[in-house]
Image: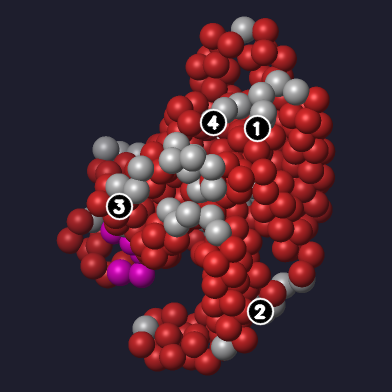
Amino acid sequence: MSPYLLLIAGSLSGGPLLAAKPNTRRAYLLAMGLLCWLLSSLRYVTGFDYRFYETVFQNTAGTGLSGLALLGQIEPGYLLLNLTVASVGGDYRAFLFVFHLLFTLLVFVWMGRYSPSPWLSVYLFLTLQYFALSMNFLRQAMAAAILLWIYPFLKRRRFLPCLGIILLAACFHRTALIMVPLCLLLSLGISRLHYGLAALATGAAYLLLDPLVQVAVRLVPKYQHYLTERYWQGNSFLYLLLPVGCFLFVLPLLKGGKGGPAASPVLANCMFYSMLIQLFITRHFILERLSIYPAFFCLLALPEAALLGGESRRSRICTGILLAGGLAYFFFAASQGFHGVYPFRGLWDRALSP
């Protein structure tokens, strides 16, 4: 636990630092990014999928470019990244260094460019389990990090660049394609009609979910095995507290989304649709993966909602709520062993083991 707590403490140091010296923004993000990169790269059997992705790397290195077709279950972008590292003599450890470097750059540069409060975004990145996600669901984490960059285009409703970014993300995880229809929904103006129709459609899909899934797996039989795995079971409504809480927290942004032509509804819509998608985990937990993409935008949405209105008593209270809520969720996630990254095990643990 101590490595995570040290990172969280480091993220919190950015609050007084950036308030006193705003020009240290880049240095702060660089320092925190380096720490996250090194910690995630130096892990050892940390993450449920650690061994799985080690095997993928070894198989990719062994087959070479001509054998990639045999690994068709894995997306081509991810396989090519494996093959690139292997072709220059790197092993799985070198691959983790390269992978986490790319992931960290995508996320931290994005936060530095668009977050109204970088230190708060870094804190939420750590406590709301996006850092943990990057050490388990490697392919989906990379896809989600790439998809963050649709934000400036989505705000301006430039759907062609959004489509290009989505297709690139889908080269690492096919589920990224859900953002094609979501892009249209996320750019819609906020209204009672919009949210009411979305809620009705979600309710109907929730009731008809299993018949719809049966049709889907007949069309794509390779996903049939998911129906017998433990992740196909429903999860507790307790897991809805986070998405519901995030949506309620950004409610002030709804007014901004209906404001003038300069106001964008994207962030508020991300929290709304993330909440709706996560409702389905009470039927089948694996469907949570579809919510990761819009939910990731909470790293902008929550700080923006907290700081709405500038430096005021309200903003300080909202920031305090975010800090307390983030820390509570971190300890909950650790107690539940989210992503298999608690406790953290590094290379030093391997060296010390008998």
Mark 4 / mark 2, whichever is N-terminal: 4
Q: Which residue, given by chain and number where applicable, does mark 1 sit on?
A: 308
Camera-nearest label, 2 or 1: 1
* 74 w.r.t. 34: above or below: below
Label 2 residue SS: loop
Separation of marks 4 and 2 at Cα, in angstroms: 34 Å
- The segment highlighted magenta reads 72-79
Image disc number at residue 159: 3
Whether pointer 4 and pointer 1 mark residues with C-beta atoms closer than 8 Å, the reply is no
Label 4 residue SS: loop
* 39 w.r.t. 256: above or below: above
Label 1 residue SS: loop
Camera-nearest label, 4 or 1: 1
Residue type, numbered disc 3: Phe
The residue drawn where x is 80% and y is 52% is 332
103 relative to 333 in the view: left or right? left
Separation of marks 2 and 3 at Cα, in angstroms: 32 Å
227 relative to 8 in the view: left or right? left
The residue sitting at the left extreme is 66
The residue drawn where x is 54% and y is 77% is 201
Q: Which residue, given by chain and number where applicable, does mark 2 sit on?
A: 283
